[in-house]
Amino acid sequence: MRRIRKALASLLLVCMLCPCISTVVNAASAELRFTDPSTTVGAEVEVTAKLTSSVNIQSLDATLTYDSSMLKFISGDNASGGDGTITLSGSGNGTSMDFILKFQALEEGTAKVEVSQASGKDSSGSSLQITNGSSAVTIGPGDPSLITEDEDTSTVSGDGPQVEVDGVQYVVSNDFSDAVIPGGFERSEMTFEGTTCQVVTQAASGESAMYLAPMDGGEADFFLYISDSGTFIPFEEVEIAQDRYLVLLRDDGSTKLPSQYQETTLTMNGKEFTAWQDTDNADYYMIYALNSDGEKALYRYDTVDKTYQRYEPQASTDDTQKKSSPKGLWGKILQLIEDFLDIAVILGGILLIILLIIIIVIAVKLRHRNLELDDLYDEYGIDLDEEEEEQAKGKKASKGKKAEKKASGKAKNEPAVRVPAKTANLRDEDDFDDYGDEDDFDEFEEVDYEDADYDDFDDEVDYEEEYGYDNDEPEDIIDDLDELLSSQPKKRGHMEPDDTFKVDFIDLD
């Protein structure tokens, strides 16, 4: 039992030590190195600081020192400072980060730029173990007249109009030297809010920037003035080649990009600008900038190689195959349909639904009517199919009889006799169909009731002698109508062959 307890205790101790062992990780190493450029007195010189590591770098914070008597700090990427101290603060997503620092040489000699402290983190959030380097700037003879007094003053006082940029209050200042004027821009004057201000202007585009100083104290800087909206945006110039540069802009609503680019912000030297990140490749951004030719265009920015490439959107198939719209009345009709297409579709759908409802209602009513007729026929025992068959048979029989009569008449060479409707055989109901026309009654002689002698009808007829029965006594019921009719003497019709008449024609001439 004791052995089991000892084994369990040992196992528990091992389990408790495992997490502690896994948290022991060595910090990744990195190096911060500088270039050693050469320049002359009064000229500008750039010092490049580059941080490299074997892992992806998340951020860097460093403090640099320099000899302010020999160098004057002008500007830098993600850098700020003056009076011999520069602060670097930047973020990245690759294995290297570059910082370009711009100085002005003040006197001959060798000026040192050194790192006083540096710290950084990798993509996992772990601290970087940074090896620091330094820069030696060699300054030769030059033109001291390019150096102005108070050139290393980081705070500039202003007495011009007050403006607000990104929630911070600034005042327009005219106190800036030619050494801080951005490349491609020239000093000029502009009237702003009724005050004549010193500005820098790009000759190619006419865009101007003003020198603004924070009202609560701090370093003054140039801000690009957007004349269309009367606003300011931070001024950041990026050199992409010799005599070629870009001035970053913010989106003014005119940019159109494919759906794969998602709008975001890009921070350059502590200044935020509109950018669009490629969702298919997060290392690439699209930025809107003013180039050295004075043109506003989109550029693709590679965050790994720090390169810029002009972006030309490809024309869509709709634009390349676009046809000229028709003119005249037909064009107006098409334009009206296009403008109110949604309304037309809705109205068409409503009309279609109404028509469908009407058809359904009519079909239901016809269905109910047919059911009622079926019930009525069933109630009175009417079979339409049998009636139609009997009528068809009767018509065929009547046609056969007529054909036989015509054939027999022709065989005997006897003239055809037209029998009036009153003397027709009453037993054959189908014969009445042959006397439907009104012209059949024209053959009857008209009777002139005014000239008729009614005395001829006064004589009583002796029915007993004529027909063999007593008019006063009821006759026996006739059982066989055919026998009675056959027993009657046949009388000669008025159309017998021997019935002749003569007509005298009088010639009135």
Image (tube, rainbow, N blue to C red):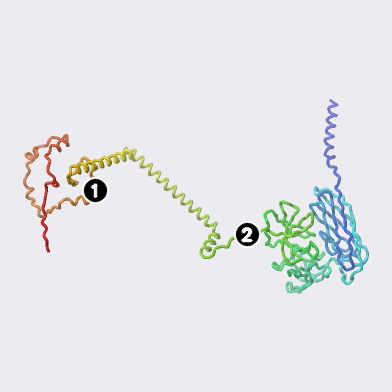
- In the rendered image, residue 212, in percent from the top left (x then y), is placed at 78, 67
Q: In this view of the protein, which residue sits in the foreground, 161 or 113?
A: 113
Q: What is the number of callouts on the image?
A: 2
The quadrant of the image that shows the N terminus is top right
Kindly indicate the quadrant of the structure image that contains residue 395. Answer: top left
- In the rendered image, residue 290, in percent from the top left (x then y), is placed at 74, 64
Kindly indicate the quadrant of the structure image that contains residue 17. Answer: top right
Q: Which residue is mark 2?
A: 320
Question: What is the CA distance from the residue labelled 1 to the residue labelled 2?
Answer: 79 Å
For mark 2, give the secondary structure. helix
For mark 1, give the secondary structure. loop
Dots 1 and 2: beta carbons under 8 Å? Answer: no
Q: Nearer the viewer, mark 1 or mark 2?
A: 2
Q: Which residue is mark 1?
A: 436
Q: Would residue 249 appear left or right of 479 to someone viewing this image?
A: right
**Which residue is situated farthest in the top direction here?**
1
* Residue 493, disc: none
Q: In this view of the protein, which residue sits in the foreground, 118 or 279?
A: 279
Q: At x 78% / y 55%, what residue is drawn?
A: 303
The quadrant of the image that shows the C terminus is bottom left
- In the rendered image, residue 251, in percent from the top left (x then y), is placed at 70, 61
What crowding class fits label 2: few (fewer than 14 Cα within 10 Å), some (14-19), or many (20 or more)? few
Q: In this view of the protein, which residue sits in the foreground, 124 or 184?
A: 184
Q: Is residue 195 above or below residue 398?
A: below
- In the rendered image, residue 146, in percent from the top left (x then y), is placed at 87, 71
Amino acid found under the numbered disc labelled 1: Gly
